[in-house]
Amino acid sequence: MDKNAPKYLRPYRDAIDRDGAAFSSLLWSCPASQHARFEALTRLYNFAGKSLIDVGCGRADLLDYLLERNFFPNHYVGIEAIEEFASAAERKQHRDCTIVRADFLREPRRLFVGADAVVYCGSLNTLSVDEFYQTLERGFDAAAEVLVFNFLCSPALAAAQFLTWHDKKDVRRFLEERSEKVDEIDDYRDGDCTMIAWK
Protein backbone atom coordinates (compact mmCIF):
# COMPACT_ATOMS: atom_id res chain seq x y z
CA MET A 1 0.00 0.00 0.00
CA ASP A 2 1.09 3.57 -0.70
CA LYS A 3 1.57 5.03 2.79
CA ASN A 4 1.35 8.54 1.33
CA ALA A 5 -2.10 7.97 -0.20
CA PRO A 6 -4.81 10.04 1.49
CA LYS A 7 -7.21 8.11 3.69
CA TYR A 8 -10.05 8.20 1.15
CA LEU A 9 -7.87 6.54 -1.51
CA ARG A 10 -6.30 3.83 0.66
CA PRO A 11 -9.13 1.28 0.26
CA TYR A 12 -8.65 1.48 -3.53
CA ARG A 13 -4.86 1.26 -3.22
CA ASP A 14 -5.20 -1.80 -0.97
CA ALA A 15 -7.54 -3.45 -3.47
CA ILE A 16 -5.24 -2.69 -6.41
CA ASP A 17 -2.23 -4.07 -4.54
CA ARG A 18 -4.25 -7.24 -4.11
CA ASP A 19 -6.12 -7.53 -7.45
CA GLY A 20 -4.68 -4.98 -9.88
CA ALA A 21 -7.08 -2.72 -11.80
CA ALA A 22 -9.81 -5.37 -11.79
CA PHE A 23 -13.50 -4.65 -11.29
CA SER A 24 -13.22 -5.70 -7.63
CA SER A 25 -10.70 -2.89 -6.99
CA LEU A 26 -13.39 -0.31 -7.78
CA LEU A 27 -15.08 -1.44 -4.53
CA TRP A 28 -18.45 -2.09 -6.19
CA SER A 29 -20.17 -5.15 -4.73
CA CYS A 30 -20.94 -6.54 -8.22
CA PRO A 31 -21.45 -5.34 -11.82
CA ALA A 32 -25.23 -5.30 -11.30
CA SER A 33 -24.93 -2.75 -8.47
CA GLN A 34 -22.69 -0.57 -10.63
CA HIS A 35 -25.16 -0.74 -13.52
CA ALA A 36 -28.07 0.08 -11.20
CA ARG A 37 -26.35 3.30 -10.20
CA PHE A 38 -25.48 4.14 -13.80
CA GLU A 39 -29.09 3.56 -14.78
CA ALA A 40 -30.27 5.86 -11.98
CA LEU A 41 -28.02 8.62 -13.33
CA THR A 42 -29.56 8.28 -16.81
CA ARG A 43 -33.09 8.34 -15.37
CA LEU A 44 -32.37 11.74 -13.87
CA TYR A 45 -30.37 13.25 -16.75
CA ASN A 46 -30.05 12.66 -20.48
CA PHE A 47 -26.33 12.70 -21.23
CA ALA A 48 -26.82 12.47 -25.01
CA GLY A 49 -25.14 15.39 -26.73
CA LYS A 50 -23.89 16.80 -23.43
CA SER A 51 -20.39 17.26 -22.05
CA LEU A 52 -19.70 15.59 -18.73
CA ILE A 53 -16.92 15.25 -16.23
CA ASP A 54 -16.90 11.89 -14.44
CA VAL A 55 -15.14 12.68 -11.17
CA GLY A 56 -13.29 9.67 -9.79
CA CYS A 57 -13.99 7.84 -13.04
CA GLY A 58 -12.11 4.62 -12.26
CA ARG A 59 -11.80 2.68 -15.54
CA ALA A 60 -14.39 4.95 -17.29
CA ASP A 61 -17.05 2.25 -16.98
CA LEU A 62 -19.76 4.93 -16.98
CA LEU A 63 -18.69 5.98 -20.47
CA ASP A 64 -18.94 2.36 -21.65
CA TYR A 65 -22.43 2.17 -20.18
CA LEU A 66 -23.57 5.38 -21.88
CA LEU A 67 -22.21 4.36 -25.27
CA GLU A 68 -23.72 0.87 -25.08
CA ARG A 69 -27.14 2.44 -24.48
CA ASN A 70 -26.83 5.17 -27.15
CA PHE A 71 -26.44 8.07 -24.71
CA PHE A 72 -23.61 9.49 -26.80
CA PRO A 73 -22.07 12.42 -24.90
CA ASN A 74 -20.59 15.32 -26.82
CA HIS A 75 -17.42 15.07 -24.73
CA TYR A 76 -16.35 13.00 -21.74
CA VAL A 77 -13.67 14.00 -19.22
CA GLY A 78 -12.70 11.48 -16.57
CA ILE A 79 -10.73 12.54 -13.49
CA GLU A 80 -8.86 9.76 -11.73
CA ALA A 81 -6.21 9.82 -9.00
CA ILE A 82 -5.32 6.12 -9.13
CA GLU A 83 -2.74 5.54 -11.87
CA GLU A 84 -3.82 1.98 -12.65
CA PHE A 85 -7.45 3.02 -13.15
CA ALA A 86 -6.48 6.03 -15.27
CA SER A 87 -4.35 3.81 -17.51
CA ALA A 88 -7.21 1.31 -17.89
CA ALA A 89 -9.55 4.17 -18.85
CA GLU A 90 -7.08 5.50 -21.42
CA ARG A 91 -6.70 2.09 -23.04
CA LYS A 92 -10.34 2.20 -24.08
CA GLN A 93 -9.52 4.99 -26.55
CA HIS A 94 -13.06 6.25 -26.96
CA ARG A 95 -13.35 9.27 -29.21
CA ASP A 96 -14.20 12.57 -27.53
CA CYS A 97 -12.75 11.23 -24.28
CA THR A 98 -10.08 12.80 -22.10
CA ILE A 99 -8.64 11.22 -18.95
CA VAL A 100 -7.05 13.56 -16.42
CA ARG A 101 -4.78 12.18 -13.71
CA ALA A 102 -5.66 14.20 -10.61
CA ASP A 103 -7.03 13.93 -7.09
CA PHE A 104 -10.31 15.86 -7.25
CA LEU A 105 -10.24 16.60 -3.52
CA ARG A 106 -6.72 18.04 -3.56
CA GLU A 107 -7.10 19.70 -6.98
CA PRO A 108 -10.71 20.89 -7.22
CA ARG A 109 -9.78 23.36 -9.98
CA ARG A 110 -9.61 20.33 -12.31
CA LEU A 111 -13.41 20.11 -12.16
CA PHE A 112 -13.80 23.47 -13.90
CA VAL A 113 -13.71 22.34 -17.53
CA GLY A 114 -17.04 23.87 -18.56
CA ALA A 115 -18.88 20.53 -18.54
CA ASP A 116 -22.67 20.52 -18.69
CA ALA A 117 -22.81 17.77 -16.06
CA VAL A 118 -20.53 17.05 -13.12
CA VAL A 119 -20.96 13.40 -12.11
CA TYR A 120 -19.87 11.50 -9.00
CA CYS A 121 -20.70 7.81 -9.21
CA GLY A 122 -19.29 5.77 -6.35
CA SER A 123 -16.47 8.24 -5.80
CA LEU A 124 -17.96 9.87 -2.68
CA ASN A 125 -18.28 6.73 -0.57
CA THR A 126 -14.88 6.88 1.15
CA LEU A 127 -14.93 10.61 1.92
CA SER A 128 -15.47 12.01 5.40
CA VAL A 129 -18.63 14.03 6.02
CA ASP A 130 -16.75 17.33 5.61
CA GLU A 131 -15.01 16.12 2.45
CA PHE A 132 -18.34 14.91 1.04
CA TYR A 133 -20.06 18.29 1.35
CA GLN A 134 -16.97 20.20 0.25
CA THR A 135 -16.85 18.04 -2.87
CA LEU A 136 -20.54 18.56 -3.63
CA GLU A 137 -20.08 22.32 -3.27
CA ARG A 138 -17.21 22.39 -5.72
CA GLY A 139 -18.98 20.07 -8.13
CA PHE A 140 -22.08 22.26 -8.17
CA ASP A 141 -19.96 25.36 -8.75
CA ALA A 142 -18.14 23.65 -11.63
CA ALA A 143 -21.26 22.38 -13.43
CA ALA A 144 -22.69 24.42 -16.30
CA GLU A 145 -26.05 22.66 -16.03
CA VAL A 146 -26.29 19.93 -13.38
CA LEU A 147 -24.56 18.16 -10.54
CA VAL A 148 -25.65 14.50 -10.46
CA PHE A 149 -24.30 11.94 -8.02
CA ASN A 150 -25.01 8.89 -5.94
CA PHE A 151 -24.15 8.21 -2.33
CA LEU A 152 -24.74 5.72 0.46
CA CYS A 153 -27.84 6.85 2.35
CA SER A 154 -28.06 4.27 5.13
CA PRO A 155 -25.87 1.72 6.89
CA ALA A 156 -27.32 -1.01 4.62
CA LEU A 157 -24.46 -0.74 2.12
CA ALA A 158 -21.94 1.02 4.35
CA ALA A 159 -20.82 -1.88 6.52
CA ALA A 160 -17.10 -1.53 5.75
CA GLN A 161 -15.17 0.79 8.08
CA PHE A 162 -13.92 2.93 5.22
CA LEU A 163 -17.44 3.73 3.92
CA THR A 164 -19.52 6.74 4.98
CA TRP A 165 -23.26 7.17 4.60
CA HIS A 166 -25.33 10.35 4.69
CA ASP A 167 -28.95 11.08 5.58
CA LYS A 168 -30.94 11.91 2.43
CA LYS A 169 -32.77 14.78 4.14
CA ASP A 170 -29.47 16.46 5.06
CA VAL A 171 -28.05 16.08 1.56
CA ARG A 172 -31.24 17.37 -0.06
CA ARG A 173 -31.34 20.35 2.30
CA PHE A 174 -27.74 21.18 1.39
CA LEU A 175 -28.59 21.09 -2.33
CA GLU A 176 -31.82 23.07 -1.97
CA GLU A 177 -29.85 25.91 -0.41
CA ARG A 178 -28.05 26.18 -3.77
CA SER A 179 -30.56 24.99 -6.37
CA GLU A 180 -34.24 25.61 -7.05
CA LYS A 181 -34.61 22.20 -8.68
CA VAL A 182 -33.44 19.05 -6.88
CA ASP A 183 -34.63 15.53 -7.68
CA GLU A 184 -33.73 12.11 -6.34
CA ILE A 185 -34.13 8.39 -7.01
CA ASP A 186 -33.70 5.76 -4.31
CA ASP A 187 -35.76 2.83 -5.63
CA TYR A 188 -32.97 0.86 -7.29
CA ARG A 189 -30.91 -0.41 -4.35
CA ASP A 190 -31.60 -0.33 -0.63
CA GLY A 191 -29.18 2.08 1.04
CA ASP A 192 -28.23 4.04 -2.07
CA CYS A 193 -29.56 7.31 -3.47
CA THR A 194 -28.94 9.33 -6.62
CA MET A 195 -29.62 13.09 -6.65
CA ILE A 196 -29.48 15.84 -9.21
CA ALA A 197 -29.24 19.59 -8.63
CA TRP A 198 -29.87 21.96 -11.54
CA LYS A 199 -28.14 25.32 -11.93
Image: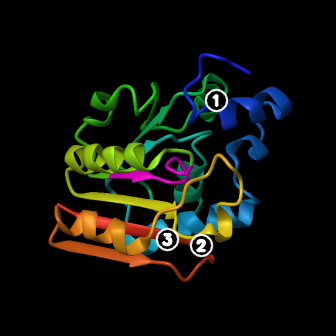
Q: Do the CB atoms of the residues marked 3 and 2 lie less than 8 Å apart?
A: no
Q: Residue at x 20, y 46 (%)?
A: 141
The amino acid marked with disc number 2 is: Gly
Residue located beneath label 1 in the image:
91
Q: Is residue 27 visible?
A: yes
Residue located beneath label 3 in the image:
193
**Whole-number angstrom distance, CA of label 3 to CA of label 2:** 7 Å
Residue located beneath label 2 in the image:
191
**Residue in front for this viewpoint, 73 or 168:** 168
Q: Residue at x 54, y 56 (%)?
A: 67
Magenta stretch: give its range. 118-125
Question: How crowded is the residue under tag 1: few (<14 C-alpha within 10 Å), some, or many (20+)?
Answer: few
**Residue in front for this viewpoint, 51 or 96:** 51
User: Would residue 117 appear left or right of 92 to someone viewing this image?
Assistant: left
The amino acid marked with disc number 3 is: Cys
Image quarter in which the N terminus is found: top right
Residue 114 to residue 118: above or below: above
Quadrant housing residue 102 = top left
Relative image position of residue 63 (x, y in whole percent) = 53, 49
Residue 54 to residue 88: above or below: below
Q: Do the CB atoms of the residues marked 1 and 3 lie less than 8 Å apart?
A: no
**Residue in front for this viewpoint, 72 or 179:** 179
Residue 198 to residue 72: above or below: below
| SS state under label 1 | helix
Q: Earlier in the sequence, mark 1 or mark 3?
A: 1
Image quarter in which the C terminus is found: bottom left
Q: Is residue 75 visible?
A: no
Relative image position of residue 129 (x, y in whole percent) = 43, 50
**Residue in front for this viewpoint, 184 or 6:** 6
